Structures are given as structure tokens and as C-alpha cells.
Image (spheres, grey):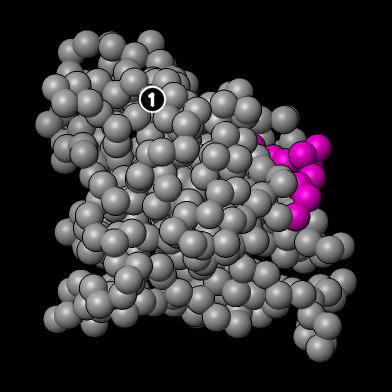
Amino acid sequence: MNTFAATEKHIKIATFNVSMEGSNYLEKGQKTPSADKLQNLLQNDDNQQIRNIAEILQRVRPDIVLLNEFDYIADADKGVKAFIKRYLNQSQNGAEPIDYPYFHIGPVNTGVPSPYDLDHDGVASGVGGDAWGFGFYPGQYGMVVLSRYPIDDEHIRTFQLLKWSAMPNAQQPIDPASNQPWYNTEQWQALRLSSKAHWDIPVNVDGEWLHVLAAHPTPPVFDGPEDRNGKRNHDEIRLWADYLTGGTAASYIVDDQGRQGGFSQNARFVLLGDMNSAPYPTADQSGAVRQLIDHPLVNGSFVPMSQGGAEYVPDVEESKSYTASWKERADYVLPSKAGMKVLDGGVFWPEKASPLYRLIKDRSDSSDHRLVWLSVALAPIDK
């Protein structure tokens, strides 16, 4: 049994889909997002949406945070470091500046051209639905992990290139018109499972290791009766479930570094990300995230909530747990049962009467998602 002493380490962990990708910054009359738009904006400190994102982070002050939909900019000086220096390190509306000495960025599948007509529109364009993950340029809808604690870069595992077909009993989409697989054999063998990437990032929290399992599965919509996005969303989430289960369930998993297999059963972890999945079936969703919430190694019992969400949809009981303006719980911070105890948590969704409501009033003010956070206590794990 884990023992939580008076000296236990408390940290705050968060996930936030920040909408810092090219299509969020379209100019009037512009239809196709620009690959360098975010990079250009980060060279100055005056973009109000980015300032609001920074202020939210300064108000909540997570020690570790995953940012979804932060475009991948390979030159960190012009990307994540510029965001930290020009926005997070600067007080926003009187909030205390915050610094993240450590971070992880990496390439994602969104916008990376495939040679195939994956969306069946008759043209193999290489972009949009014909990219390995939906996007109009490589790196769109990317991810960043920011940390106040050191990251063990040498032992990061990434799963950008893992093929969907490698997963046993994968939910291969079927075209109902022909009753044949939506993807032909060549396409199916080539198609990558992760629409962005899946990352296992070890973080050293004052001598205690915490594995940040980060992802952003595709939305289970924007397709047709073949449900190719819904099935991919399910299996992207299943990848983490299999990874945690380990053993034969994870034998098909090979990371981009060539290492096979799943996760250590006695290690501490937290699952972070916009999972694009509600915890119950809806007209558009399968409830796929329950594969994680109900996993025997995951503590899914604590549900972060907000009064702002409850006010947003007052006649729906679940609205207090909503994390997106489109009225669902989609973003998750799910800790391991081992070595962690949940102390508190919430969704940053101020009520209309709050002076901070300005930060989330409209989508253009920050994002269509809300930051989700947990405060947890770490303790040694029994071996």
C-alpha cells in the first residue's frame, strides 16, 4: 500500500487545447491556413488571443501542462521558446509571470502528405483528408509539453509512425455502399494510427518519476457512414489502454525508436489530452474514452468541474464537467492509481459575473476548449 507522508510532493498537472494553429488566424478572405502564421505571431508579444492563453496559464499555474493545437515549429527559438519568453514570462493583466525551463516538441502526422486518396474525393491531394492526419501543412494541430521539472529526453517514447493495421482487431472502416474496406490493402498497410502523435515523456519531479502520456486523437466526426474518424478515434484511445495493460496486449506496439512493448505496471503516469471523446455514447461518439477512465491502472473517479460550465448549459447535469464550448467533456487529466493521490481539480471556466470571464467569453478570446487541471500528491511506489 502506498503511504502518503507529510512531506509528500504536491504538483499541478493540466491539459489545454489552445487553438494556436493556422486556421485560427485566418485573414479576411483567406481560405487556406498559413504554415508560418503562428511562428510570425510569436515574434511579437501583442496578439490578444495568445496573451489570453498565457494569462490563463498564469492564473492556473500548472507545473506540467500539455498544449494541444500548438503548431509544430521545429525551431524552438521561434516557436515554444518565443511563446515562453514573450508571453508566459511577461505579466498578463497583472497575473504573475510563469516560466517553464523544460519542454518537449516533436513532429506530428497532421498535414504530412500521403500519396493516397484517403478521403475518397477522387483526388490524391496530399493535404486535408489525404494527409496522414487531417491538416493543411505539416505540423498543424501540433502538441507541446511544458514542465517546471526536468524531462528525460533520452527515454521519451513516441508513436507517430505506428501503423493502424499493426493493432490486432483494429476497427478497420468499411464502406457501407460496397461492403468493402474503406482503405485498400496498400493504404491500410501504410496508414498511421496516430492522427497527431502519442508521446510517453518521463519527468523527474524531485526524484520521483512521472510519465506524461500525451495525445490528441482525431475528432470522431467529419466523415461519412464508414465512420473512419470515429473508428480511428476509438483505436487511438485504445493504443494507450493497450500500452498500459502491457504484456501480450501491447506486443504489437513498437515506438519510433524501435522499442517494442508497453508500459511498466508499477510506474507512475498521467494521461493528458483532448481525447475528442465524451465519457458516454452520443449520436456522434462511442464513449471510447471509457477505455482509459475504466482501466484498472487509472484513477478515473475524480471528475474536474466548473461553475461556468454549469451556467453555460444550466438544464444539463453533466455540463459542470464540460471542457469544450461545443458542450461535451473532451479533455482529460487521468492519473495512475499507483503513486498518486488526487487532491483537487477543476476546469477553467469562469462564470459570467467573474472578471476573468473575458478570457473565455468567445472562441476568439482564447479557445473553444477549457484548461483542465488536477492537483496531486506523489508518493513512492511499492515495488
Could you say which quadrant of the image residue 362 lies in? bottom left
In magenta segment, residue 161: yes
Task: Check the image and report above or below for 195 versus 273.
Answer: above
Task: Check the image and report above or below for 24 versus 266.
Answer: above
**Is residue 294 visible to us here?**
no
Q: Where is residue 338 in the image (x, y as percent from the top left)?
A: 71, 73
Q: Where is residue 141 in the image (x, y as percent from the top left)?
A: 41, 35
**Is residue 285 visible to us here?**
yes
The chief SS type of the magenta part is loop
Read off the residue under disc 1.
Answer: 37
Q: How crowded is mark 1: few (under 14 residues within 10 Å), some or many (20 or more)?
A: some
Residue appearing at x 66%, y 30% in the figure: 256
- Write down the region rendered in magenta: 149-162
Q: Is residue 220 left or right of residue 284?
A: right
Task: Check the image and report above or below for 347 versus 203.
Answer: below
Q: Where is residue 367 in the image (x, y as percent from the top left)?
A: 32, 50
At mark 1, the secondary structure is: helix
In magenta segment, residue 68: no
Residue appearing at x 45%, y 65% in the figure: 372
Q: Position of residue 52 (x, y in %)?
A: 39, 52
In front: 234, or 376? Answer: 376
Q: Which amino acid does label 1 sit on?
A: Lys
| Quadrant of image for the C terminus | bottom right
Q: What residue occupies the far front of the structure in this picture?
A: 94
Task: Check the image and report above or below for 302 versus 17.
Answer: below
Could you say which quadrant of the image residue 223 lies in? top left
Q: In this view, does 302 lie to the left or right of 13?
A: left
Residue appearing at x 21%, y 39% in the figure: 222
